[in-house]
Image (cartoon, helix red, strand yellow):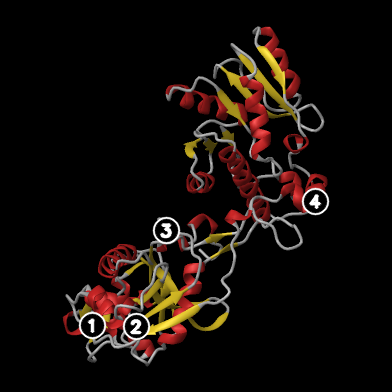
Amino acid sequence: MVPVKDLVGTKSRLAPVLNASARAGLTMYMMKNVLSALRGAGVERVCVVSPDRTVLEIADEAGAAMLLQESSGLNPALEEARHWAVERGASSLLVFPADLPLLKAPDVGAVLEAAERAEGPLAVVSPDAGRTGTNALLLRPADALPFAFGPNSFDAHLNAARERGLSIKVCEGTRLAFDLDTAEDLARFGDEPQSARAEADSKAHKPPEELRVLPVGGIPEVRPGDDLANLIAGAAGDELLEEGDVVVVTHKVVSKAEGRLVDLATVEPSVLAKSFAARYDKDPRQIEVVLRESKRVVRMDRGIVISETRHGFVCANAGVDVSNVPGDETVCLLPLDPDTSARRLRDSLSARTGVDLAVIISDSFGRTWRQGITNVAIGVDGMNPLADYRGEKDPHGHPLIASVLAVADELASAAELVMGKTAGIPVAVVRNYPYKKGPGTGQDLLMEPERDLFR
């Protein structure tokens, strides 16, 4: 069991040197390190208990079970976790706090080995550097003694074990004893030799020596009902698509194939649409379509509607567009479910070509405080759209605690450089990018409302 506090206010004693976002990132970095050490030691069943859903989502991505904490406080949370584990047949229980940044698989192995050398009911207790707190606790059976984490918990756990007649093993180690709570701890952590805390390089994000972006030309005008995968595969030919490619497709051709087109002649504008359109010399029917596609209007000014779509995208005019659409009386909407569209397209392309690849559906978005638009990913399948560098080190050995890159957006932008806005090329292939395969979606790129400073 790995208990993790709410990220809001986490590691408050580090506030003089780290802001709230950095402290949250540090907590996630340390938790991921603990989970990695447990996996490396062969611990097959790991559960993270936390009141924070973001923590649990990251734990789930790391392969741990999730338990949403309902009570308040560390020891009550562990009691919930113990009940959860016993219900699932646990005969012993191992607890590691999440703030052990130096923990390695051999340290976990030492605790497990101490238990293996003893028979019957026991408690293995690992103290912190001051021998006051508890940095690891193994109990056999799982309910061998009550939890007493907090001040002087090392002695409290030892005394409780003696009172119950348990075999007692004390397991100590330099890395196991190091927990990170204060600015002084953080400074000592930064001074640790790189060799003492470097993970195996298997999870490092290594940039490619060469990245290629290839336009796919020759795709005809797409109409409702067209088999888009067949059109792309036909234009790409037998040799263009390779294993590991990322196929970036503009949403416009996806929307056309799915029939996401509106004939403005069929639209009766509302009073609000007429009033706003008259003020800025706009087509009230188009404004009405924008309003219908909006879940929440953020701002209406200067002839532009900034709104949140039903997908959760905050963008100009709810993604309703008249460019690259035949005729003057037709507008194009965003795909109804871009992630589902990406999944269907990937499945069809993989079936036709026999290669495993990822698919990104892109659209052009404006950016706060920046001139110009850039392509972003609104639908993703076959890859994780975010590259999480938290838990890795920079070249100077400093831990990265807030670096999460939106790689799907970056790939969409790279692809747009060979598509252009007027060249009639709606598809591009990005090759040699070492993306992480996974069940990621475009929804993963959306900012949670509670973290949105502009909401």
Amino acid at pointer 1:
Val
Measured Cα–Cα span from mark 4 to mark 2? 50 Å
Amino acid at pointer 4:
Pro
* x then y, percent, for residue 158: 72, 16
| Residue located beneath label 4 in the image | 193
Q: Secondary structure at mark 3?
A: loop
User: Can residue 271 be seen by looking at this rendering?
Assistant: no
For marks 3 and 1, the one nearer the N-term is 1
Q: Secondary structure at mark 2?
A: loop
Q: Secondary structure at mark 4?
A: loop
| Residue located beneath label 1 in the image | 222
Q: Quadrant of the N terminus?
A: top right
* x then y, percent, for residue 178: 76, 38
| Residue located beneath label 3 in the image | 440
| Residue located beneath label 2 in the image | 426
Measured Cα–Cα span from mark 2 to mark 1? 10 Å
